[in-house]
Image (spheres, rainbow, N blue to C red):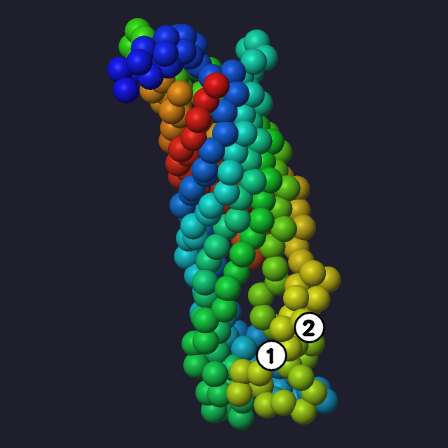
Amino acid sequence: MKKLIQIFLPFFIISSQVFAIAGFGLHLDRSMYSVAETTTPLIAGGIEVASITHHGFDNGFGIGGYLYIDAIPVIDIDLEGNLLISPYDFSFIQNNVVSIDKKQFGWVAGSGYLTLQKKLFKLSIPLLAKAKLTAGAGINFNISPPVIDQTMLESIIPTGSDVSNGTVDTKALIEYIGDNKNSSTGFHIQTGLQFKILMLDSFLYYRQVFADNVIPDAKGFGSLNLRLGMGF
């Protein structure tokens, strides 16, 4: 064990003298937003025969991965991909009778981020650890599914089935979401801290995203982000 320490310690010390020229790892976030409750009528023959209520949802959790390159003077290049997850409840009311009462459905958004970052301030503990404050901006690409409405129900409920029994054509659901997904491109700004102990990297930062309809009927959202990974 002592020999292994003697072999690898110089490498760790050299690595700790500078911030990693590249790194990768796990990304986790808590996104902050609020989607209001809405009720949508279902029309047949020009007459309202039922309605769907989305009970709204607040905030969500994201998980993904990141890769950054710090080998370029002045700026860092940061790439990230993640999934944002928010369960929500919906109800189906037909002839003033609740057929489905707060059945849970999943809402998931996929996003990719390209960010250029600049170091604002830096601290170091010789031979051991470093920390720096960064700020950056970039572009993002987003895909999110539609929420349940009349068109979706007509597409995914098998012909002749009763909506209230919850029978869903899974293949039709996947095809519908693929054909009706919401795609958007936006920009974002972010600032936060990076900590490095030997080859271990961690980041804590806030990001503000400006992009239409990633979150239903919203023009953006904020997120608090945590990263854990390795830097080389």
Please identify the quadrant where the N terminus is shown: top left
The quarter of the picture where residue 176 lies is bottom right
Question: Residue 105's x, y, as percent?
Answer: 50, 69
What is the x, y in percent for residue 178? 69, 61
139 sits left or right of 120 in the view: right
The percent coordinates of residue 204 (x first, y second) are 38, 31
Q: Residues within 10 Å of mark 2 (few under 14, many from 20)?
A: some
Residue 129 seen in the figure: no
Q: Residue at x 46, y 22 (%)?
A: 231
What amino acid is labelled 2 in the image? Ala
Disc 1 residue type (three-letter): Val
Q: Residue 12 at what x, y percent from top left?
A: 38, 14
Please name the residue shown 46% across and 66% down the image: 88
Q: Is residue 165 above or below residue 181?
A: below
Name which residue lies at 72% across and 89% down. 45
Mark seen at residue 231: none
Work out whether residue 228 or residue 215 is closer to the camera in this orientation and state it.
Answer: 228
Check whether the beta carbons of the residues at disc 1 and disc 2 lie within 8 A of each other: yes
Tell me if I can see residue 227 in this picture: yes
Q: For residue 4, what is the image quadrant?
A: top left
- Report the front residue among 87 and 184: 87
Residue at screen point 50% across, 64% down:
106
SS of the residue under disc 1? loop
Examine the rendered structure and indicate whether residue 186 appears above or below residue 196. below
Q: Which of the labelled discs sits on residue 168, or is there none?
A: 1
* Marks 1 and 2, how far apart at CA: 8 Å
Give left or right: position of 93 versus 177. Answer: left
Secondary element at image label 2: helix
Q: Which residue is the site of mark 2?
A: 172
Disc 1 crowd rating (10 Å Cα; few below 14, some 14-19, many 20+) is some
